[in-house]
Each structure stands twice: as structure tokens, then as C-alpha cells.
Amino acid sequence: MQFMSSQYDTILCGVNENKKRIEAIQRENRSLREEVSDLKSSLKLLNDGRVQNDCVFRGISLCDGRKTAKEATMYICNKIGANIDPSNIIQTFFVGSKHAKSKTITVRFANKINKVQFMSAKSKLREITEMKNVFIHDCLSKETMKLFNHAKSLKAVGFKFVLAKGNHIVVKKNEQAPTITVKTMGDVDKLLLASSTTTTNMTTSAFAADGDDAVS
């Protein structure tokens, strides 16, 4: 009997020691996850900063007199009345196949002021027949593009608007609803869960109401 009690105490001691080790590992894992999350946020912030003065032109058709990316960019600037000096466009390059009829150009402005000035005038594209297939939007970092693509899944649960504005992703259920800024994948997942739960509750209530009507 004494032997069994001794064995039990030894086993219990081992269990408690293992429990402490597991708790220590769990604390370390939480710390590592937080560190990785912080590093990802820092990397996103850094890469967002690198493209903050960039934008993308899609649907560009080249012709005589504007064969280069810089010439095509300046042509569009002049067409929409954006008074941008060529020296304030510090980098332009084609993206994708060089044989494609419709070109995509990435443009880097010298500063935020020039980019805002250009983006404010881009709505005039719709007034120009030859520019009807040209689309211009902010250049997103890889991290923000990944977040944007994930945020698009919110449309399946009732969000009408999912937009990329600068380096921010904003969503709205409708025109009257408040604008929500999503900063992380977790923000999107929380909205998905909340919207799915709301939809499920509404469906359950509807079934309950139908059941009451049938009984009455």
C-alpha cells in the first residue's frame, strides 16, 4: 500500500512538472505569435510607405508619339488636366507582357502632393471617349493587396462596398452605414463571424415565425 502511494506521488509530481512545462511553452508561443504579428505589421507599414506615391494605370493603348511609359503617362495627365510637371514623375514602367495590346503602367510621383493632384483629376477619364477603358488606382503593397483580397469575402455576407483607399481598406454595408477601416486579417474575420452570426439568427427567427404562423 505504501509502495502504491509512493508511486502515485511520483506520477502526480511528474504530471505537475509536465503541466508547468506546457504552460511555459504556451506562454512562449503566445509571445512568439505576438512578435511575429508585430513584425508583419512593421513590414506592412514599411512596404506601404514605399508605394505611397505610386499608382497603376490599366487599359493603356499606345500609338505614335507615346510609345514609352513616361510618354503615355504624360499624355493622360494632359488629357485630364492634371498639371503635373514631367520632372515630378520620377519612375514609370510597363507591367506584364510587352506584346499585350492593352498595357499596364506603374507610375511613381515625386511626392504625395503630385499624386493627390493627379488622383483628384482622374474622374475626368470618364468624359473622354478614348479613355473609357482606362482605369487608375492606388498601387498597393503585397501585404495590403492580400488584405484587400481577403476583405472582398465580406461581400458574401452583405457588405456592398469594399474599397482600397491609399494604404487603407475600408468597408461599408450600404451607403447609409458607417465606414469601417480594416487593418488586419483578424479584423476581416471578426466582421465575417459577426455578419454570419447575425444572418443565422435572422434565419432562425424567420423559421420560428413561420412555425408560429403554421400552428395558429
Image (cartoon, rainbow, N blue to C red):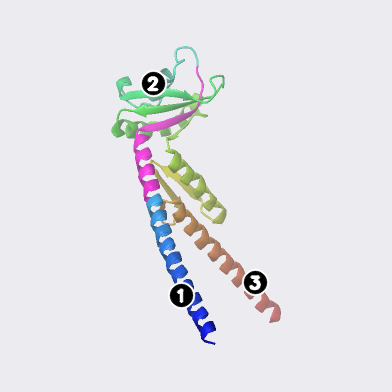
Mark identifier at residue 207: 3
Query: How many other residues sit within 10 Å of disc 3, few (<14), some (14-19) or many (≥20)?
Result: few
Tell me the residue that label 2 is attached to: 74
Front-most of residues 203 and 184: 184
Provide residue 119's location: percent of width, then percent of height: 37, 34
Q: What residue appears at the point 33 percent right and 35 percent down from the top-left corner? A: 116
The residue closer to the viewer here, 202 or 174, is 202
Q: Amino acid at mark 1?
A: Cys
Q: Provide residue 172's location: percent of width, then percent of height.
A: 46, 53
Q: Which residues are magenta?
A: 38-62
Corner quadrant of residue 47: top left
Separation (CA) of disc 1 from disc 2:
77 Å
The image shows residue 30 at horizontal and vertical percentages of: 41, 59
Q: Residue 144 occupies which quadrant of the picture?
A: top left
Q: CA separation, marks 1 and 3?
A: 54 Å
Residue 192 falls left or right of residue 21: right
Vertical relation: 212 (above or below) 84: below
